[in-house]
């Protein structure tokens, strides 16, 4: 009996010490320190893309705002994609109040493609548009965003919502657009 008590005691001691060690390890994906953001805010940021020596990110807001950085630490406001909304938006999504949501950006064949969402809160009447530019550098003579209009849309009463675009280029060179939130989940075109 004393042997069993000693064995149980040793096992409990070992288990509690290993639990202590496991509990002391930081959890992956935990909260960031406040200093990590350095005061920069960007709702629904795009993929970060490098153009020359500058990194760019676009995010939700009026005109599709942007931020740029040379070191990925210090970020400065850049120009928005649109000074004025493309004409098609007022016709296709009249409830939109000038906010563009959750853009995504990718360089394909020498051009930067920016997909953006147009919607209004709580509505399925939404659309994803596409704009492109050969460079992200505003000082370059070639810099100019061209809007290519609506790519896909959804209407109220449907079973999906065309928001939150994510772009992917597969190994065969095909470009895919994933989108959707709430209702029936992810769509891929």
Image: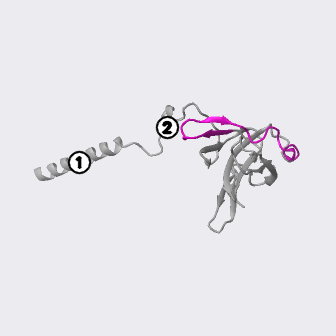
Q: Quadrant of residue 81?
A: top right
- Tell me if 99 is positioned left or right of 36 in this view: right
- Which colour assignment does the render follow? one colour
Q: For residue 77: magenta? A: yes
Element type where label 2 sits in the image:
loop
Question: Residue 142 location, x and y as percent?
Answer: 75, 48
Residues drawn in magenta:
66-91
- How dense is the environment of label 1, judged by Cα within 10 Å: few (below 14), some, or many (20 and up)? few
**Relative to 66, is 148 above or below?**
below
Q: Residue at x 72, y 50 (%)?
A: 114
- Tell me if 137 is positioned left or right of 71 in this view: right
Q: Residue at x 66, y 34 (%)?
A: 77
| Mark seen at residue 32 | 2
The residue labelled by disc 1 is: 14
Q: For residue 97: magenta? A: no
Name the foreground residue: 97 vs 121.
Answer: 97
Question: Residue 172 location, x and y as percent?
Answer: 65, 69
- For marks 2 and 1, the one nearer the N-term is 1
Element type where label 1 sits in the image:
helix
| Mark seen at residue 54 | none
Q: Quadrant of the C terminus?
A: bottom right
Question: Is residue 1 in view from this perspective?
Answer: no
Q: Residue at x 17, y 52 (%)?
A: 7
Question: Residue 136 location, x and y as percent?
Answer: 69, 46
The residue furthest bottom is 172
Q: Residue at x 67, y 41 (%)?
A: 59
Closer to the observer: label 2 or label 1? 2
Question: Is residue 63 in view from this perspective?
Answer: yes
**Relative to 154, is 83 above or below?**
above
């Amino acid at each position: 009996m004393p042997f069993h008590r000693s064995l149980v005691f040793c096992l409990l001691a070992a288990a509690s010490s290993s639990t202590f060690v496991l509990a002391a390890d930081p959890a992956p994906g935990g909260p960031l320190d406040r200093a990590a953001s350095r005061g920069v805010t960007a709702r629904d940021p795009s993929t970060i893309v490098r153009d020359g020596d500058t990194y760019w990110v676009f995010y939700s807001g009026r005109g599709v705002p942007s931020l740029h950085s040379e070191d990925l630490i210090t970020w400065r406001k850049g120009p928005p994609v649109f000074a004025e909304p493309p004409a098609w938006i007022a016709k296709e999504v009249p409830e939109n109040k000038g906010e563009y949501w959750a853009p995504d950006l990718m360089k394909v064949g020498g051009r930067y493609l920016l997909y953006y969402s147009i919607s209004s809160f709580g509505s399925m009447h939404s659309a994803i548009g596409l704009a492109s530019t050969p460079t992200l550098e505003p000082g370059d003579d070639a810099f100019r965003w061209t809007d290519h209009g609506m790519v896909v849309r959804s209407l109220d009463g449907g079973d999906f919502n065309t928001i939150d675009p994510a772009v992917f280029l597969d190994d065969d060179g095909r470009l895919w657009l994933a989108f959707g939130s709430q209702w029936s989940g992810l769509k891929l075109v």
